Image: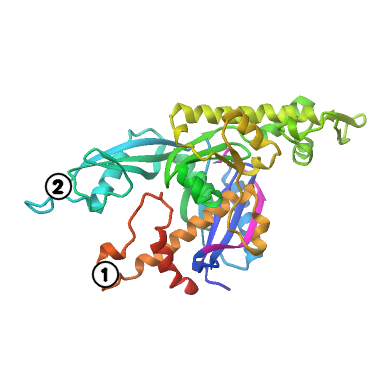
Amino acid sequence: MMDSNDIVVGLDIGTVNVTAVIGECDVDRMGEPVLKVVGVGNAPSEGIRNGVIINKESASSCIVQAVEAAVNMSGRDVEEVVCGISGEHVKGLNSIGVVKVDSRRRGERPEITEQNKQEAMKSAGAIPEVPDRETFFVMPIEYKVNNQGGIKNPLHMIGNRLEVQAHIITASTSAMKNLKNCIERSEYGIQNMVPITLADCKAILVPEEEKAGVMVIDIGGGTTEVGIQMNGATYFTGVVPIGGKYVTSDIAAVLRLSSDIAEKIKVNQGACHESLVDDKEMIEIPVTSGSFGERTVSRLKVCEIAKARMWEIFTKVKRAVEDTKTMQYVNSGIVITGGGALLPGVSEVAEEVFKIPVRIGVPLGLTGAAKDYENPKYAGAIGLAQIGLDMKIRARLAKRRPDPGKSSREEMPQDEGDGMFKVAGKWLWTKAKNFVKDF
């Protein structure tokens, strides 16, 4: 059996399902390291509401079920996971940090060091303390040196004033502790905890749209997570407290059905855009205990119910983004993912609301049997596993000594502002090829 140190596990804890993805390092046709999915497991969520743990025992049991299902499929052992963070308690904001840069020796011009960068980031992250709230992600957007902006990496530049614009993600302290305790109760370690929108971006975006600027909308069961990225930087993180289960609830309430039957109608015959529905088509309502015979309902009626709720979700997303003036960074369009993206017509409704191109996002780059998981509902878990792989590759490279024939500046990769988990470009891939066979 493969050493557990050589595998990665993405754990997406959702309102409807808990999904675990086990992966290992492989190489593509170009010899570059990629994630190979070897195990996937799902379990219905219990003890979890809108991304927050409300019953540790039930939630822990679901986590164990999902991971064990992935373990049984893959034949790998699991010691730690990369866990996704989601829910209404997750909030993002942009902040600015400024530090003075001093010369290291008298008479020398001040040169920006890695320590200066870290101090600027620390300054940006020094936001006012709020009870039961903590900062768990600080990511640079851009730097300014002596008021000259648009700089992705100021290292070794000359200047006496360094400013950084950073994106900060905060979360409820109690919600984070409950989630950590729940995973530990399941007897798994935590490799890292990552906002689910960053994992989505890792799994579903192509370089061209990410470089130009893109919005990712993850429609989960209880919440809709939103992120905006451009050129490797995150400009917006937000959550709308409505998800796909609300469509089910609406169908059940309007048509006076049980939630189970409403969910089956939504999954099997539902749509949320009238262009996909024949207005003469009827849906038979299954006979249930206590009913007085079969009923029928117009499929267009079901569509109208679903569209109203999806329209509300996208309108709230648009309003939240416009309030922060970050819509200007969405130049290549919108990518919708998550289980809610499976409802036919979702992209058409989003295009009507936003008036820009929209596509459905599925995990990219999967091969072999893993192609069965090219599905929006697996995007978060697969992205988390990919992030875990990047972290392990970087950790192994960091342990390698620099080439004695090169200066440290030539040997080590420079941070080009590609976000917390972007791998450092061609340098890393070139180096990684040399040891991936031993991973």
Point 61% across, 49% down: residue: 362
Q: Is residue 258 left or right of residue 427?
A: right
Point 65% across, 32% down: residue: 349
Rendered image: mark on residue 417: none
Residue 139 percent location from the top left of the image: 38, 45
Give the mark nearer the N terminus: 2 vs 1.
2
Q: Residues within 10 Å of mark 2 (few under 14, many from 20)?
A: some
390 is higher (above) or lower (below) than 267: below
Find disc 2 in the rendering and name its residue.
102
Q: Give, as a single range, the part of the protein colored magenta.
A: 34-51
Point 89% across, 35% down: residue: 287
In the depicted view, which residue is nearer to us: 48 or 278? Answer: 278
Q: Amino acid at mark 1?
A: Lys
Find disc 1 in the rendering and name its residue.
406
Q: Is residue 363 left or right of residue 208?
A: right
In the depicted view, which residue is nearer to us: 253 or 433? Answer: 433
Q: Nearer the viewer, mark 2 or mark 1?
A: 1
Q: Amino acid at mark 2?
A: Asp
Q: Secondary structure at mark 2?
A: loop
Q: Is residue 415 left or right of residue 242?
A: left
